[in-house]
Amino acid sequence: MKKNIAVILGDGIGPEVTQQSIKVLDAVAKKFNHEFHYRYCLMGADAIDKTGSPLPDETVTICLDSDAILFGAIGHPKYDNDPTAKVRPEQGLLKLRKSLQLFANIRPITTYASLHHLSPLKAKNLEGVDFVIYRELTGGIYFGKKELSDDKLQASDDCVYSASEIERIAHLAFQHAQKRRKKLTLVDKANVLETSRLWRRIVQEVAVQYSDVAVDYMFVDNASMQIIINPKQFDVILTENMFGDIISDEASVLSGSLGLAPSASVGSAVALFEPIHGSYPQAAGKDIANPVGSILSAAMMLDHFGLTEEAQLVRDAVNWTLQHGFVTKDIDAINSYSTTTIGDLVRDYT
Amino acid sequence: MKKNIAVILGDGIGPEVTQQSIKVLDAVAKKFNHEFHYRYCLMGADAIDKTGSPLPDETVTICLDSDAILFGAIGHPKYDNDPTAKVRPEQGLLKLRKSLQLFANIRPITTYASLHHLSPLKAKNLEGVDFVIYRELTGGIYFGKKELSDDKLQASDDCVYSASEIERIAHLAFQHAQKRRKKLTLVDKANVLETSRLWRRIVQEVAVQYSDVAVDYMFVDNASMQIIINPKQFDVILTENMFGDIISDEASVLSGSLGLAPSASVGSAVALFEPIHGSYPQAAGKDIANPVGSILSAAMMLDHFGLTEEAQLVRDAVNWTLQHGFVTKDIDAINSYSTTTIGDLVRDYT
Ligand SMILES: CC(C)[C@H](C(=O)O)[C@@H](O)C(=O)O
Ligand SMILES: CC(C)[C@H](C(=O)O)[C@@H](O)C(=O)O
């Protein structure tokens, strides 16, 4: 199989973790006789530094012309505490999501028995945790009209959703639920928000076509508790953009380290794969970042290509390293291995 | 001291938990020679059933004419899954917050050594946890313009903030931080939202007047992780309405039961005191609900009246019951006591 993969190394630890995934992908290609071609492009603070724009047009062109996108991380602290900065790294990612219509961000939440001791949660709360979050990614308050009054004393962000935006991701989430434990939980704030009431109505309508899937509805404030108190109850969670941002990061702590969690963003055209961790600038260049989130994102990409055996091999390799204590500093501060070493080990196992 | 207290029993378990607080307040009044007069008024599903309106005008009049408001809980499931219902219980609470300008919701997060075994978190993550959340309560997406298009296929909620709305709660939060460990964390999403950038700018400006308070800024997605991974790091958290709704409920799980957490909502006029739990309709009328959240809210009310000794006595009474295993079913499913019994024990100790 021949595949063109657009690679966006991005900011902070993005480059070093993504390089590990590429090593692993190359090993997979060799073993299974595939050809993966990488085309590097710019986004984020890195792109601002080099081109002045957080998302050069060339990046969009290359991405659209590829079979998948592998992305590292975005963000730089120099922009965060400057509320007046006009150009910001995150604009690049948001614009890419919008340009490619990556409307569904999929985040599987798994826990590893060998890492239960790391989780802030008691082991008994972690057993049997296995769910997936479908977060809407191209609508809501992220993309509504933003205004700052001329006197700079009033600001607004509009949150807008249309029925069709809700339907298309609802279908994906229901289809996934059918292949899993057949339960879908819509997380919203329908007791306050008009958009949430639209979500609830449309999901009720779509649900009719998936009568084998049990649906329940949960307010986001309650969901933020349930994810910690009783995470086993969830199978597929469906939610809007802003709530999904919050609860999917929250849920990622269950596994013991944010550094382990992968994600896929899919849409009508090409799909994007990225670890859910951020650019973690304090660790950049130190060869200490956890590459597992990126490597498991690459595994999701292989699945997306239909290469399920290859994807499983990569996951097995990751499990093997975790079980044998080959882990980065975030997981074991004393007996830790470098980013590169973990990448090498996963590659060699693969 | 003479005080007029407006009492809103509300929905679900609201009445039964609030009755326990009143018993305790009466004991305090007797012991310390105060006079507390209660005036009962309606709000929520209860008010809709009886008057057709979730917040009768009379309730607002009585509240404005009182020294404080003691409130139970709001909400009924019959409205939640009906996205087309025109009148909903929660509108009553939102309108009350707005009418009385209750712009700051204050939620202390404490953990109890005797209950560490109940928390989903490991005990080591709970030691030393003691922070307070200031949630803005009368602005943001809760109160912005809401629209549903004529064809019912598009909905929107506007999130608006003005500098003055941010300033007034920021001052309260900074003042509280000065009396505590002198640290304030603003939780926002300044990498995406214009309103968050306004929050960040105004908080930076207000901070200049509180140079003894260390300020940091945290994205809400990160905050939702940090509250679980490392809750000790927080002293005072300041945040906008929607983010505050989510992270304060999340934080309440640290103590082991949502049923324990109190809150105060303050503004320019009269203040309101309520447990943070909801109406929990499944438990209503069964005498099993935890009254501690309500009783500790009454203690916050006593503090608000300047009756600090009285408030401390109530808190001591609650601690005594918790330490001696006098707890409701949410805390100990096997050896549990009824709502009324806990109320009686706290009253008798007081
Ligand atoms: C970097 C930021 C804009 C982004 C988001 O909020 O969507 C990130 O937190 C994520 O979840 O991918
Ligand atoms: C009942 C609901 C409208 C309310 C809110 O979202 O503010 C509740 O969750 C709370 O936190 O007091």
Image: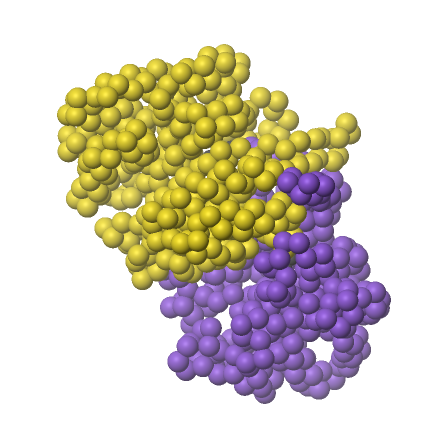
Chain colours: A purple, B yellow
**Vertical arrangement, residue B308 with respect to residue A276, above or below:** above
At a point 53% along the width and 69% down the height, the residue shown is A259
Image quarter where the N terminus of chain A lies is: bottom right
- In this view, the residue in front, A235 or B75, is B75
Q: Is residue A342 above or below residue A72?
A: below
- Asked whether, in this view, residue A51 is left or right of residue A169, the answer is right
* Quadrant location of the C terminus of chain A in the rendered image: bottom right
For residue A177, say whether it is visible: no
- Depth check, front residue: B100 or A247: B100
Residue at point 52%, 65% (across, down):
A258
Can you tell which quarter of the image residue A80 is in? bottom right
Please say whether residue A138 is visible from this viewpoint: yes
Image location of residue B276, percent across then percent down: 40, 37
Image quadrant assignment for residue A157: top right
Residue A225: percent from left, percent from top: 45, 47
Name the residue located 76 percent from the left edge and 76 percent from the top edge: A40
Q: Where is B157 relative to A6, above or below?
A: above
Q: Quadrant of residue B18?
A: top left
* Depth order, front residue of B61/B344: B61
Q: Is residue A46 left or right of residue B342?
A: right
Residue B325 or B251: which is nearer the viewer? B251
